[in-house]
């Protein structure tokens, strides 16, 4: 059977037959599609380029008001039924009555288009949160193909994807990850609690002894106020030391929110060493740290402290389980390109190289009383920070755990 041909159909009849069908397809499309006119913005962007501007982001930093000025050159052309439904409007007419209020200028979202236009890219995408007629917040991801000429910018098609469900799932996953990390921290704390309690008892005992001494100086037949004052000062100092230990422990095991900041790597190293040092001292293990105080990382202090403390404690247990005479645990931090490499090396008996890959699997453990969750949680934390973690070992040659973190606050490096 011969295929149907439209070669002999008059242009006017062909347009009449195709136009309504195309329009119906646009109206009934299940994806929200908003048609906008960016032609005047396109001309303004090209004028900026012609004036010698080479970085539009730097230009916006110096002239933040330009974003709103460019957005004012934009206009809305059409919207399909899915857009009306997304904004929970009663009709398309009602939507367009308030469209400029519903979709105001947004530097992050708008700049994605401005930048793509400036750099002559074929497409762009971005994220923003919409507010519907009922006041409901709807997170979306949008996409748009960009033409090569000004005329094409008169009808830019923006496709919106409601990611409410995905974001809720992501939030739940993040909450579960945070709770799992906290459970791991509590488990880790439980392993060294006896040593830490001993550490706390020292300043408390010293404070009590100083307080008793001050009373004796004051209750003598001839009170020695100077000695009493000195003893009271010692009491206050020991009490502050005990309070600081409690504060650090509370911060480590507490339910604190994740806070991604740029900070010196030495801070997390010192905090982890504080946590495990009583255990190391009790087992006569010398701990050595080699950290450049100028090296900074981007991440959550408490979570990085947790990873280090876990690796350090594993090293203590490894050294204590073998006959090694060199009882040394080493923590090093060094910059490498755009990453910072952390290493924890022990002088224990080592691990069979064939079992290295299994170390980071849940419930796998080399300890007789271990749960096998410390290293999987450490891996989850490191990967969520955009880094990687690995181990290398030889029988009798000790084990070295390494992980990387981004040295800068590049959000693209962080896991979603």
Image (cartoon, rainbow, N blue to C red):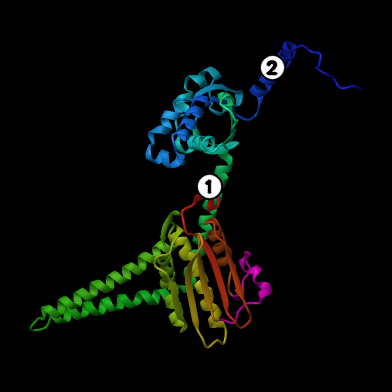
Label for residue 37? Answer: none
Q: Quadrant of residue 156?
A: top right
Q: Give the SS element for disc 2.
A: helix
The structure residue drawn at horizontal position 28% and vertical position 78%, both measured from the top left corner, is: 206
Q: Quadrant of residue 396?
A: bottom right
Residue that label 1 marks? 171
Q: Which residues are magenta?
A: 348-368
Marks 1 and 2 sit apart, C-alpha to C-alpha, by: 44 Å
Is residue 81 shown left or right of residue 211? right
Residue 169, relative to residue 18: is it above or below?
below
Is residue 10 shown left or right of residue 153? right
| Residue 132 shows up from this direction | no
The structure residue drawn at horizontal position 53% and vertical position 59%, both measured from the top left corner, is: 381
Query: What secondary structure is the magenta-colored segment mainly?
Result: loop
Residue 379 % position (x, y): 57, 62
Residue that label 2 marks? 19
The structure residue drawn at horizontal position 20% and vertical position 81%, both measured from the top left corner, is: 213
| Residue 9 shows up from this direction | yes
Residue 135 belongs to magenta span: no
Give the residue at the far right of this rendering: 1
């Amino acid at each position: 059977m011969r295929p149907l041909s439209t070669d002999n159909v008059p242009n006017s009849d062909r347009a009449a037959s195709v136009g309504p069908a195309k329009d119906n397809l646009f109206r009934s499309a299940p994806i929200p599609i908003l048609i906008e006119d960016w032609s005047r913005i396109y001309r303004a962007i090209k004028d900026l380029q012609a004036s010698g501007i080479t970085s539009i982001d730097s230009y916006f930093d110096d002239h933040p008001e330009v974003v709103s000025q460019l957005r004012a050159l934009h206009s809305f052309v059409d919207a399909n039924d899915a857009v009306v439904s997304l904004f929970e409007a009663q009709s398309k007419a009602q939507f367009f009555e308030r469209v400029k209020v519903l979709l105001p200028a947004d530097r992050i979202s708008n700049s994605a288009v401005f930048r793509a236009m400036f750099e002559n890219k074929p497409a762009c995408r971005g994220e923003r949160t919409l507010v519907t007629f009922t006041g409901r917040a709807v997170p979306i991801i949008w996409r748009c193909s960009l033409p090569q000429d000004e005329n094409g910018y008169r009808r830019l098609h923006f496709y919106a994807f409601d990611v409410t469900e995905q974001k809720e799932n992501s939030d739940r996953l993040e909450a579960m990850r945070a709770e799992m990390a906290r459970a791991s921290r509590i488990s880790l704390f439980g392993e060294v609690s006896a040593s830490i309690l001993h550490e706390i008892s020292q300043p408390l005992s010293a404070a009590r002894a100083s307080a008793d001494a001050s009373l004796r100086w004051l209750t003598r037949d001839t009170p020695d106020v100077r000695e009493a004052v000195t003893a009271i000062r010692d009491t206050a100092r020991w009490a502050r030391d005990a309070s600081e230990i409690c504060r650090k422990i509370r911060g480590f095991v507490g339910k604190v929110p994740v806070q991604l900041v740029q900070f010196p790597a030495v801070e997390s190293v010192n905090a982890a060493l504080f946590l495990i040092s009583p255990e190391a001292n009790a087992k006569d293990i010398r701990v050595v740290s080699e950290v450049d105080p100028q090296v900074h990382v981007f991440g959550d202090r408490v979570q990085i402290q947790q990873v280090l403390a876990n690796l350090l404690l594993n090293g203590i247990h490894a050294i204590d389980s073998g006959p090694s005479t060199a009882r040394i645990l080493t923590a090093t931090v060094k910059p490498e390109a755009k990453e910072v490499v952390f290493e924890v090396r022990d002088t224990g008996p080592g691990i069979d190289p064939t079992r290295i890959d299994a170390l980071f699997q849940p419930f796998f453990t080399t300890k007789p009383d271990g749960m096998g969750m410390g290293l999987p949680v450490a891996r989850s934390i490191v990967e969520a920070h955009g880094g990687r973690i690995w181990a290398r070992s030889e029988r009798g040659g000790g084990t070295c755990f390494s992980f990387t973190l981004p040295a800068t606050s590049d959000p693209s490096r962080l896991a979603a």
